[in-house]
Amino acid sequence: MASPSTAILLALVIALACAATTADARFTAMQWTPAHATFYGDETAAETMGGACGYGNLYATGYGTDTAALSTTLFKDGYGCGTCYQIRCAGSRWCYWGSPVITVTATNLCPPNWAQDTNNGGWCNPPRTHFDLSKPAFMKMAQWRAGIVPVMYRRVPCVRRGGLRFALQGNPYWLLAYVMNVAGAGDVAEMWVRSGARGAWVRMSHNWGASYQAFAQLGGRSLSFKVTSYTTRQTVVATDVAPANWCLGLTYQARVNFS
Protein backbone atom coordinates (compact mmCIF):
# COMPACT_ATOMS: atom_id res chain seq x y z
CA MET A 1 0.00 0.00 0.00
CA ALA A 2 1.31 3.45 -0.89
CA SER A 3 2.23 5.81 1.93
CA PRO A 4 0.04 8.91 2.52
CA SER A 5 2.76 11.18 1.13
CA THR A 6 3.12 9.01 -1.99
CA ALA A 7 -0.66 9.01 -2.50
CA ILE A 8 -0.80 12.79 -2.20
CA LEU A 9 2.09 13.18 -4.68
CA LEU A 10 0.39 10.79 -7.12
CA ALA A 11 -2.90 12.70 -6.85
CA LEU A 12 -1.05 15.97 -7.48
CA VAL A 13 0.64 14.54 -10.59
CA ILE A 14 -2.71 13.30 -11.92
CA ALA A 15 -4.35 16.65 -11.21
CA LEU A 16 -1.58 18.51 -13.01
CA ALA A 17 -1.82 16.14 -15.95
CA CYS A 18 -5.58 16.70 -16.19
CA ALA A 19 -5.11 20.46 -15.95
CA ALA A 20 -2.54 20.35 -18.72
CA THR A 21 -4.90 18.31 -20.90
CA THR A 22 -7.63 20.90 -20.41
CA ALA A 23 -5.38 23.90 -20.97
CA ASP A 24 -3.69 22.36 -24.01
CA ALA A 25 -6.87 21.06 -25.65
CA ARG A 26 -6.47 21.04 -29.42
CA PHE A 27 -8.84 19.95 -32.12
CA THR A 28 -7.53 17.30 -34.49
CA ALA A 29 -9.00 15.98 -37.73
CA MET A 30 -11.62 13.25 -37.42
CA GLN A 31 -12.11 10.10 -39.49
CA TRP A 32 -13.67 10.15 -42.95
CA THR A 33 -17.43 9.52 -42.84
CA PRO A 34 -20.00 9.07 -45.66
CA ALA A 35 -22.67 11.70 -46.37
CA HIS A 36 -24.16 13.56 -49.35
CA ALA A 37 -23.77 17.06 -50.74
CA THR A 38 -25.89 19.41 -52.82
CA PHE A 39 -25.51 23.11 -53.63
CA TYR A 40 -27.61 26.25 -53.51
CA GLY A 41 -27.40 29.55 -55.32
CA ASP A 42 -25.38 30.27 -58.45
CA GLU A 43 -21.75 30.86 -59.35
CA THR A 44 -21.75 34.27 -57.65
CA ALA A 45 -22.61 32.68 -54.28
CA ALA A 46 -24.84 35.70 -53.59
CA GLU A 47 -27.46 33.51 -51.91
CA THR A 48 -24.91 32.23 -49.40
CA MET A 49 -24.30 35.70 -47.95
CA GLY A 50 -25.74 36.19 -44.48
CA GLY A 51 -27.02 32.83 -43.33
CA ALA A 52 -28.24 31.43 -40.04
CA CYS A 53 -24.86 31.82 -38.33
CA GLY A 54 -25.04 35.60 -38.72
CA TYR A 55 -21.68 36.14 -40.39
CA GLY A 56 -23.13 38.70 -42.81
CA ASN A 57 -21.15 39.39 -45.96
CA LEU A 58 -18.89 36.36 -46.17
CA TYR A 59 -16.31 38.18 -48.25
CA ALA A 60 -15.99 40.96 -45.68
CA THR A 61 -15.86 38.56 -42.73
CA GLY A 62 -13.19 36.37 -44.32
CA TYR A 63 -15.13 33.19 -45.15
CA GLY A 64 -15.48 33.71 -48.88
CA THR A 65 -17.36 31.16 -50.97
CA ASP A 66 -15.88 27.94 -49.57
CA THR A 67 -18.87 27.52 -47.26
CA ALA A 68 -21.65 25.09 -46.43
CA ALA A 69 -25.11 25.04 -44.95
CA LEU A 70 -25.35 22.12 -42.51
CA SER A 71 -28.27 19.78 -41.98
CA THR A 72 -29.96 20.02 -38.58
CA THR A 73 -27.94 17.13 -37.19
CA LEU A 74 -24.65 18.92 -37.85
CA PHE A 75 -25.90 22.47 -37.21
CA LYS A 76 -26.73 21.67 -33.57
CA ASP A 77 -28.93 24.72 -33.00
CA GLY A 78 -26.08 26.98 -34.05
CA TYR A 79 -23.29 25.35 -32.09
CA GLY A 80 -22.01 23.94 -35.40
CA CYS A 81 -21.43 27.42 -36.79
CA GLY A 82 -17.82 28.04 -37.76
CA THR A 83 -16.83 24.36 -37.89
CA CYS A 84 -14.59 23.32 -40.77
CA TYR A 85 -14.81 20.22 -42.96
CA GLN A 86 -12.85 18.52 -45.67
CA ILE A 87 -15.16 17.00 -48.29
CA ARG A 88 -14.49 14.89 -51.37
CA CYS A 89 -16.89 13.49 -53.94
CA ALA A 90 -16.99 9.68 -53.80
CA GLY A 91 -18.51 6.96 -55.94
CA SER A 92 -20.33 9.05 -58.54
CA ARG A 93 -19.75 9.47 -62.27
CA TRP A 94 -20.11 13.20 -61.65
CA CYS A 95 -17.03 13.36 -59.41
CA TYR A 96 -13.97 15.00 -60.89
CA TRP A 97 -11.05 12.70 -61.60
CA GLY A 98 -8.74 12.30 -58.63
CA SER A 99 -11.47 13.12 -56.08
CA PRO A 100 -10.16 16.60 -55.15
CA VAL A 101 -10.62 17.53 -51.51
CA ILE A 102 -12.25 20.85 -50.63
CA THR A 103 -12.29 22.60 -47.25
CA VAL A 104 -15.41 24.51 -46.23
CA THR A 105 -16.68 26.43 -43.22
CA ALA A 106 -20.20 26.05 -41.83
CA THR A 107 -22.00 29.40 -42.17
CA ASN A 108 -25.65 28.46 -42.62
CA LEU A 109 -28.44 25.99 -41.82
CA CYS A 110 -29.97 23.69 -44.42
CA PRO A 111 -33.50 23.39 -42.98
CA PRO A 112 -35.57 20.19 -43.08
CA ASN A 113 -38.11 19.77 -45.85
CA TRP A 114 -40.78 17.60 -44.24
CA ALA A 115 -42.84 17.54 -47.45
CA GLN A 116 -40.11 15.44 -49.10
CA ASP A 117 -38.83 11.99 -48.23
CA THR A 118 -35.47 11.93 -46.46
CA ASN A 119 -33.95 10.05 -49.41
CA ASN A 120 -35.79 11.95 -52.12
CA GLY A 121 -35.55 15.72 -51.73
CA GLY A 122 -35.58 16.02 -47.94
CA TRP A 123 -31.82 15.80 -47.90
CA CYS A 124 -31.41 17.87 -44.74
CA ASN A 125 -34.09 16.09 -42.73
CA PRO A 126 -32.87 14.55 -39.45
CA PRO A 127 -31.05 12.31 -38.84
CA ARG A 128 -29.16 12.75 -42.13
CA THR A 129 -25.76 14.42 -42.16
CA HIS A 130 -25.79 16.59 -45.26
CA PHE A 131 -23.86 19.51 -46.75
CA ASP A 132 -25.57 22.12 -48.93
CA LEU A 133 -22.53 23.81 -50.44
CA SER A 134 -22.14 27.08 -52.25
CA LYS A 135 -22.10 26.39 -55.98
CA PRO A 136 -18.45 27.54 -56.38
CA ALA A 137 -17.40 25.07 -53.66
CA PHE A 138 -19.46 22.22 -55.15
CA MET A 139 -17.95 22.77 -58.59
CA LYS A 140 -14.45 22.25 -57.21
CA MET A 141 -15.19 18.56 -56.63
CA ALA A 142 -18.07 17.59 -58.95
CA GLN A 143 -20.05 18.65 -61.98
CA TRP A 144 -22.95 20.88 -60.93
CA ARG A 145 -25.38 18.99 -63.20
CA ALA A 146 -25.28 16.11 -60.72
CA GLY A 147 -27.42 18.04 -58.23
CA ILE A 148 -26.53 15.67 -55.41
CA VAL A 149 -23.46 13.46 -54.95
CA PRO A 150 -22.23 11.03 -52.31
CA VAL A 151 -19.26 12.37 -50.39
CA MET A 152 -16.80 11.50 -47.68
CA TYR A 153 -16.22 14.16 -45.05
CA ARG A 154 -14.30 14.80 -41.89
CA ARG A 155 -14.04 17.70 -39.46
CA VAL A 156 -10.68 19.42 -39.49
CA PRO A 157 -9.13 22.29 -37.52
CA CYS A 158 -10.04 25.74 -38.79
CA VAL A 159 -7.05 27.82 -39.89
CA ARG A 160 -7.70 31.55 -39.45
CA ARG A 161 -5.51 34.59 -39.76
CA GLY A 162 -5.69 37.11 -36.95
CA GLY A 163 -7.66 37.01 -33.73
CA LEU A 164 -11.29 36.45 -32.81
CA ARG A 165 -13.70 39.05 -34.17
CA PHE A 166 -16.73 40.41 -32.34
CA ALA A 167 -19.46 42.20 -34.30
CA LEU A 168 -21.53 44.20 -31.82
CA GLN A 169 -25.23 44.98 -32.12
CA GLY A 170 -28.09 45.75 -29.74
CA ASN A 171 -28.95 48.82 -27.67
CA PRO A 172 -27.75 50.49 -24.43
CA TYR A 173 -29.42 47.77 -22.35
CA TRP A 174 -28.79 44.73 -24.53
CA LEU A 175 -25.53 43.63 -26.15
CA LEU A 176 -25.59 41.12 -29.00
CA ALA A 177 -22.16 39.88 -30.10
CA TYR A 178 -21.45 37.73 -33.16
CA VAL A 179 -18.24 35.71 -32.79
CA MET A 180 -16.30 35.20 -36.01
CA ASN A 181 -12.91 34.07 -37.36
CA VAL A 182 -12.68 31.30 -34.77
CA ALA A 183 -9.70 29.00 -35.26
CA GLY A 184 -9.14 25.48 -33.93
CA ALA A 185 -12.46 23.65 -33.55
CA GLY A 186 -14.15 26.73 -35.00
CA ASP A 187 -17.15 26.56 -32.69
CA VAL A 188 -18.29 28.41 -29.57
CA ALA A 189 -20.22 26.98 -26.62
CA GLU A 190 -20.09 29.69 -23.98
CA MET A 191 -19.19 33.34 -23.73
CA TRP A 192 -18.77 36.02 -21.06
CA VAL A 193 -18.31 39.77 -21.29
CA ARG A 194 -16.62 42.14 -18.84
CA SER A 195 -17.00 45.90 -18.81
CA GLY A 196 -13.88 47.74 -17.65
CA ALA A 197 -10.73 46.35 -16.11
CA ARG A 198 -12.30 45.59 -12.73
CA GLY A 199 -15.81 44.63 -13.76
CA ALA A 200 -17.33 41.23 -13.05
CA TRP A 201 -17.67 38.69 -15.83
CA VAL A 202 -21.25 38.57 -17.13
CA ARG A 203 -22.32 35.26 -18.61
CA MET A 204 -23.89 35.72 -22.05
CA SER A 205 -26.72 33.50 -23.27
CA HIS A 206 -26.80 31.85 -26.66
CA ASN A 207 -29.10 33.79 -28.98
CA TRP A 208 -28.85 31.95 -32.32
CA GLY A 209 -26.13 30.83 -34.66
CA ALA A 210 -22.84 32.39 -33.61
CA SER A 211 -24.40 35.18 -31.53
CA TYR A 212 -24.44 35.65 -27.76
CA GLN A 213 -26.32 38.25 -25.73
CA ALA A 214 -26.08 40.06 -22.40
CA PHE A 215 -28.89 42.10 -20.87
CA ALA A 216 -26.77 44.73 -19.15
CA GLN A 217 -25.58 48.33 -19.45
CA LEU A 218 -21.99 48.00 -20.61
CA GLY A 219 -21.33 51.32 -22.33
CA GLY A 220 -18.60 53.77 -21.44
CA ARG A 221 -15.90 51.23 -20.61
CA SER A 222 -13.74 48.84 -22.58
CA LEU A 223 -15.09 45.35 -23.26
CA SER A 224 -13.32 42.05 -22.72
CA PHE A 225 -14.67 38.65 -23.76
CA LYS A 226 -14.08 35.11 -22.56
CA VAL A 227 -14.93 32.39 -25.09
CA THR A 228 -15.13 28.60 -24.68
CA SER A 229 -15.06 26.12 -27.57
CA TYR A 230 -18.04 23.75 -27.91
CA THR A 231 -15.87 20.80 -28.95
CA THR A 232 -12.61 21.11 -27.03
CA ARG A 233 -13.87 23.15 -24.03
CA GLN A 234 -10.73 25.26 -24.42
CA THR A 235 -11.20 28.84 -23.17
CA VAL A 236 -9.44 31.99 -24.34
CA VAL A 237 -9.68 35.48 -22.89
CA ALA A 238 -9.72 38.48 -25.20
CA THR A 239 -8.86 41.48 -23.03
CA ASP A 240 -9.95 45.03 -23.91
CA VAL A 241 -11.13 44.04 -27.40
CA ALA A 242 -13.37 47.08 -27.72
CA PRO A 243 -12.16 50.46 -26.38
CA ALA A 244 -14.15 52.56 -23.95
CA ASN A 245 -15.75 54.47 -26.83
CA TRP A 246 -16.91 51.32 -28.63
CA CYS A 247 -19.96 51.60 -30.87
CA LEU A 248 -22.76 49.27 -31.91
CA GLY A 249 -22.57 48.26 -35.54
CA LEU A 250 -18.79 47.89 -35.55
CA THR A 251 -16.57 44.79 -35.47
CA TYR A 252 -13.59 44.54 -33.13
CA GLN A 253 -10.71 42.11 -33.44
CA ALA A 254 -8.85 40.49 -30.56
CA ARG A 255 -5.21 39.53 -30.42
CA VAL A 256 -5.96 35.96 -29.36
CA ASN A 257 -7.50 32.93 -31.01
CA PHE A 258 -7.82 29.20 -30.45
CA SER A 259 -4.90 27.10 -31.60
Image (tube, grey):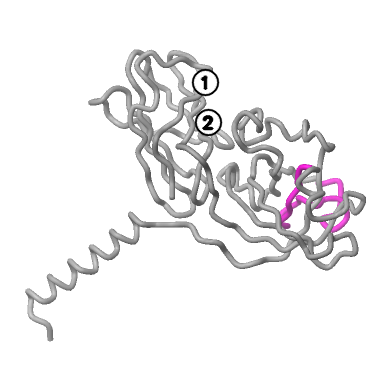
Where 175 sits versus 8, above or below?
Answer: above
Q: Position of residue 93 (x, y in %)?
A: 90, 64
Mark 1 Cα-neighbour bin, 10 Å: few <14, some 14–19, many ≥20: some
Can residue 63 be seen by looking at this rendering? yes
Residue at (46, 20) in percent of width and height: 174
Residue at (86, 46) in percent of width and height: 115
Can residue 127 be seen by looking at this rendering? no
Judged by its main secondary structure, the magenta piece is loop
Q: Quadrant of residue 208?
A: top right
Q: Which residue is mark 2?
A: 178
Front residue of 118 and 21: 21
The Cα–Cα distance between marks 1 and 2, rounded to whole angstroms, is 8 Å
Q: Quadrant of residue 54?
A: top right
- Mark 2 falls on what kind of element? strand
Identify residue type, mark 1.
Gln
Query: In the picture provided, is 69 more to the left or to the right than 138?
Result: left
Residue at the farthest bottom position: 1
Query: In the picture provided, is 5 more to the left or to the right than 41?
Result: left
Q: Which residue is mark 1?
A: 169
Q: Position of residue 89 (x, y in %)?
A: 78, 61
Identify residue type, mark 2.
Tyr
